[in-house]
Amino acid sequence: MAKAEAGVKIIAVDADGKSSRVKAERLEIELSDGRRLLLSFPDRAWGDLEIEAETATEAEVPVISVQPGACNLLTLRVDVHHDLLPVVEDDAAPDPVAPAISALPPVLTLSVQRALEGDDKANAPKKNHIRRWAQAALQGDAEVTVRFVGEEEGRTLNRDFRGKDYATNVLTFSYGEGEMLAAAESGAPLTGDLVLCVPVVVREAAEQRKTLEAHFAHLVVHGMLHLQGYDHIDEADAERMEALERKILRSLGYADPYA
């Protein structure tokens, strides 16, 4: 049986009514001021159409809202928030709503890199999923790069930085303990990198009879906790870290990764 071609047929129509056809798995629409709207299509006849907004800088927060225009029409609006924190004057009266407003989640500045080809590239998760997993494990502001690599780069990094000549599922590169403390005291965001080796993650998911999505979610959460100083060198630390992983993954809708 011939394999169905991936991608969605898209008809683009210009202002003069002239149409052209393209075939794509992802559509990037450039708006004004460096804003972009990204549409990711399912690779089958069914599935989710994912819509993601991006801005020119991480300091700007894109917010998508959907408004019904008619029975067969929806308006998609993209706004940019430059500052989500409330401004409070020193002599202002206490506001009973302020605690709820100020209890905003930590700010995650996320960069995703994919040094992949072929099936490995297709198996890597999408950025909106990565952001959701990483944000769930975040306890303070952070600037994180998540890089997905093949077996060769994964093996090289593990050998060069850990002295182990094989590719492992996830590597975390973060500040040392003293630098993390200094960053926290100064209010500066924590910075670090997570490197996930896609073919290793795929094999492990199959061996452990987990969905690939659930295993990626676990490893991103695991790496984010390492980045923030958690470890599993001794039994007590391992139990503490694993309990937190279970709690975070349960909040994301995933089963116990250690069951």
Image (cartoon, rainbow, N blue to C red):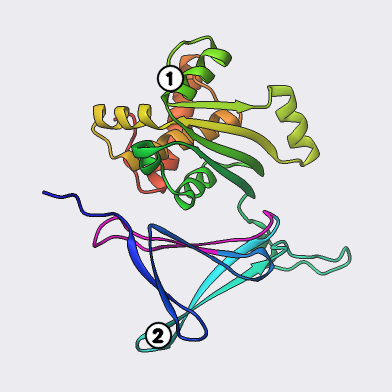
Q: Specify the farthest residue to the bottom.
A: 70
Secondary element at tag 2: strand
Amino acid type, residue under disc 2 in the picture: Leu
Q: Is residue 118 left or right of residue 193?
A: left
Residue 34: x and y in percent read 66, 63
Note whether residue 246 is visible.
Answer: no
Lateral position of residue 190 relative to residue 131, left or right: right
Task: Give the numbered dot on residue 167.
Answer: 1
Front position in the image: 21 or 188:
21
- For the C terminus, the image quarter is top left
- Tell me: 183 left or right of 150: right
Magenta stretch contains residue 42: yes
Q: Looking at the image, which residue is at 33% across and 63% down?
A: 8
Q: Residue 188, percent across and down? A: 76, 40
Q: Is residue 155 above or below residue 186?
A: above
Other-residue count near label 2 (Cα within 10 Å), few / some / many at <14 / 14–19 / ≥20: few
Q: What amino acid is at disc 1?
A: Ala
Label 1 sits on a secondary structure element that is: loop
The residue lying toward the viewer, choosing from 224 and 163, is 163
Residue at the outermost left position = 1
Tag 2 and tag 1, C-beta contact below 8 Å:
no
Q: Which residues are magenta?
A: 37-58
Confirm whether residue 180 shows in the render: yes
Q: In the rendered structure, find residue 73 and report the number of the disc placed on it.
A: 2
Mark 2–mark 1 Cα distance, whole angstroms, equals 49 Å
Rendered image quadrant of residue 178:
top right
